[in-house]
Structure formats: C-alpha cells, structure tokens
Amino acid sequence: MSNGQTRSKAATENGRARTVDMKLEVVVIPVSDVDRAKHFYARLGWRLDVDIEKDDQFRVVHFTPPGSQCSILFGKGVTTEAPGSAQGLHLIVSDVDAAREDLVNRGIDVSELFHDVGGVFHHAGEEGRVSGPHPARKSYGSFASFSDPDGNGWVFQEVTARLPGRVDAHVTTFSSAMDLASALRRAAAAHGEHEKLTGQHDENWPDWYAEFIVREQAGEQLPT
C-alpha cells in the first residue's frame, strides 16, 4: 500500500474525513492612532506580542487576550478599513460578571449585563437588548459590551456549555487554569444537587465531575 493510500485510509477512519486544520490566528482591527490603541489594549490586560515599525508608513502591533488562541493586529499600512468599523467582535468568557468586573476595575467603560429578547444570540447594535443576564443563565445568552477609543465594538458572551457538535465529545480542553476552575465550580454545584437527590455521599465524585465537564463542553444532557 502506498503512502497516499495509507493517508487516504487514515483520513476516512470511523467514517469521518480529516482535513487540514484551519485555525483562526489574527483579526485585524482598524485604528486611527496606533499608540492610543496600544495603550488601551494594554489596559485590558492583554499580552503584547510584537510592536514592529518598519518606517513611517508601516507598523504592526499584536495583542492576545488571556486564554485566547487568536490574536488581534493593528497599526499603520495593515488595513484599508475605516477606523472603528470592526463591530461585534466576540470574546467568549465562562463568567461574564467576573469578566466585566475585571475591566471596570481597570478603568474601562463597560456596559451593564444584558440579554436579547429574541433568544440566546446577540443582535447587531443595541436592538433587542434587555437589561440583566439571561433569566435562566443559558449558555450563549448573557452579554456585556465595550469599545476601543476608535469605536471598534467588543462583546463579552458567556459560554459554559457549547452547542452540540461544536466541541468533540471525546476531547475536553481548557485554554486556561481559570476556565478549568470555573468548570470545576459548576460541577461542584451540580454535584451538590445530585447528592441532595440521592440522599447520600457520592464516593465516586471525581468520575461524576469528569462526566459533567465533558458533557457540558460537548453540549450534551448533563448528569443529574
């Protein structure tokens, strides 16, 4: 069997074709004042990766949000879009209250928590916004927003359980210790309710926690 045939066979194992990974790496943000933007994104607590200036016409500044695999890039000569035209940039967080409080403590102007009257997804602009988090605290349902000095718009979206199919049910990953800690706290709270229902201490609680976290990430029905 040739190498090509071997790769073809591996690619179709379990009836699922494999493709080359396409990982979103950078989002370009149009700004009018590079130094002002750099100061703002540094205040958010994001990591400064590079600041490279070739000449008066070209400069690249690169920041990465905490726990993110995707970064932002802005500067001179990097985009023809109008400053402030980037809207609806979503930052996924496991605790929207904590994320908002962190930016408020950094002196950033952040909206109050809100949800959408029509469902769990955010409408463009402020149409359909209802004050406060989602009543049932549904995953994908609670938001807060802020803008950079040019008006580029960012949205915090609270996600604790992914939609079915969004995450491989056989793979559980966390981008940071903070996200893992949040998942463990949710598992602990749910396990407490589980023990109330059974009326006894569950000696196999690590297995229960693990099942809860895997199912939550995959968007499957949670154990009770």
Image: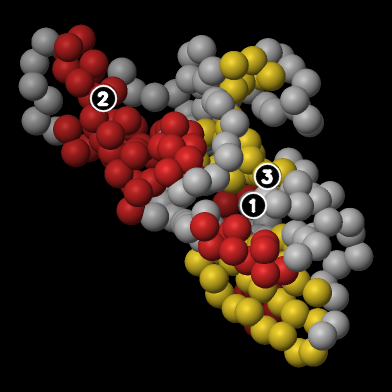
Q: Residue tagged by mark 1?
A: 16
Cα separation between marks 1 and 2? 36 Å
Rendered residue at 58%/40% (across/down): 109
Kindly state the secondary structure of the residue where label 3 is placed: strand
- Residue 156 percent location from the top left of the image: 58, 38
Rendered residue at 71%/14% (across/down): 118
For the question of whether residue 2 can be seen, the reply is no
Amino acid type assigned to the residue bearing label 2 in the image: Ala
Rendered residue at 55%/25% (across/down): 113
Sequence-wise, the earlier of marks 2 and 3 is: 3
Q: Nearer the viewer, mark 2 or mark 3?
A: 3
**Could you tell whether 158 is left or right of 35 in the image?**
left
> Does the CB distance between marks 2 and 3 fall below 8 Å?
no
Kindly state the secondary structure of the residue where label 2 is placed: helix
Q: How is the model colour-coded?
A: secondary structure
Rendered residue at 72%/69% (across/down): 34
- Residue 153 percent location from the top left of the image: 72, 44
Cα separation between marks 2 and 3? 34 Å
Mark 3: give few (<14), some (14-19) or many (20+) Cα within 10 Å. Answer: many
Amino acid type assigned to the residue bearing label 1 in the image: Arg
Kindly state the secondary structure of the residue where label 1 is placed: loop
Q: Residue tagged by mark 3?
A: 147
Amino acid type assigned to the residue bearing label 3 in the image: Ser
For the question of whether residue 214 can be seen, the reply is yes
Mark 2: give few (<14), some (14-19) or many (20+) Cα within 10 Å. Answer: few
Cα separation between marks 3 and 1? 41 Å
On-image quarter of the N terminus: bottom right
Q: Nearer the viewer, residue 91 or 210?
A: 91
Q: Nearer the viewer, mark 1 or mark 2?
A: 2
| Image mark for residue 189 | 2
